[in-house]
Image (spheres, rainbow, N blue to C red):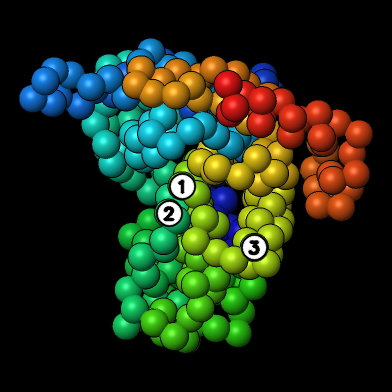
Amino acid sequence: MIDAILDKEKIDRDPQGFEKYMLELSNLTKVYPTPTGDFVVLENLNLKIKEGEFVSIIGHSGCGKTTLLSMIAGLNPISGGQIILNGTPISGPGPDRGVIFQSPSLLPWMSALENVLLGVEKVFAHATKKQRDDICKYYLSKVGLDGAFDKKAKDLSQGMKQRVGIARALALKPQILLLDEPFGMLDSLTRGELQDVLLEVLDKEKTTGIMITHDVDESIFLADRVIMMTSGPRAQIGDILDINYERPRNRKSILEHPTYYDNREHLINFLEH
């Protein structure tokens, strides 16, 4: 029943079976006016992301990574160029883009289920109350919170709150998932656990996604491509590294892969120059 509800929101492939570009950034530019003149954060940035592809974006602080993600989310106006999502130019925020922030920003007096339900009630207004509850429980279970549906957000650990944030974004069945350093505030053990959770969900849902991270190993472990941005101002894409590891992925096998340290060195060398 849940699958039948969620299937209504699925994106079809090209009739001829070709992979579609889910997201296209064309000459994307962001300018902030200042008393001393315009400050150009991003300039003529171009990128295409295929349906079902997961990419990570790395670069030094201040290069415009979060600005880029917020523009795709529709939370920050575009100064120039265009962002096209599944064939349609974006003009503002919408449920077709699920956003996972570094801090999940839950409503503390509400339960985990109620926090996820807020968006689900809007997106799946055609469903019954039970169906909407089932969608929320399905994704909370997917992130390992099947025993915490009724726990208040204020009583959850930071790691559990982030799990709710991931479930909340996925439950909307977005066309693309946007992650802004989602594990940056977590300890290394919890970070590793949630990386595994995210990877498992991505592999099952075939979700298209973009993740900002400062962690080179996280980029290699999760992404199909790593987008390396030049330092700002006027930041652009400086390099792109294809990560050719099969899915589903296993942390141990990736660490033992003969190309792992070559990929790692490539990314570190870019960041150091």
The residue identified by callout 3 is 188
Q: Amino acid at mark 3?
A: Ser
Residue plotted at (45% across, 18% down): 236
- Which mark is nearer the camera, 1 or 3? 3
- Side (left or right) of 140 relative to 152: right
Indicate the position of residue 166 as horizontal and vertical percent values: 52, 60
State the CA–CA distance, disc 2 to disc 3. Answer: 18 Å
Which of the two labelled residues, at mark 2 and mark 3, occupies the earlier sequence position? 2
Indicate which disc residue 11 carries.
none
Say if 172 sits above or below 144 in the image: above
Residue at (55% x, 42% y) in the render? 214
Q: From the image, tell me which residue sits under label 2.
A: 101
Q: CA distance from mark 2 to mark 1?
A: 5 Å
Residue 13 can be seen in this image: no
Query: What's the amino acid at mark 1?
Result: Asp
SS of the residue under disc 3: helix
Dot 2 crowding, Cα within 10 Å, few <14, some 14–19, many 20+: some
User: Mark 2: which amino acid?
Assistant: Phe
**What residue is at 69 percent from the left and 34 percent from the top?**
224
Tell me which corner region of the image, top left, top right, bottom left or bottom right, holds residue 264: top right
Query: Which of the two marks, 2 or 3, is nearer to us in this view?
Result: 3
Q: Which residue is mark 1?
A: 180
Crowding at mark 1 (Cα within 10 Å: few <14, some 14-19, many 20+): many
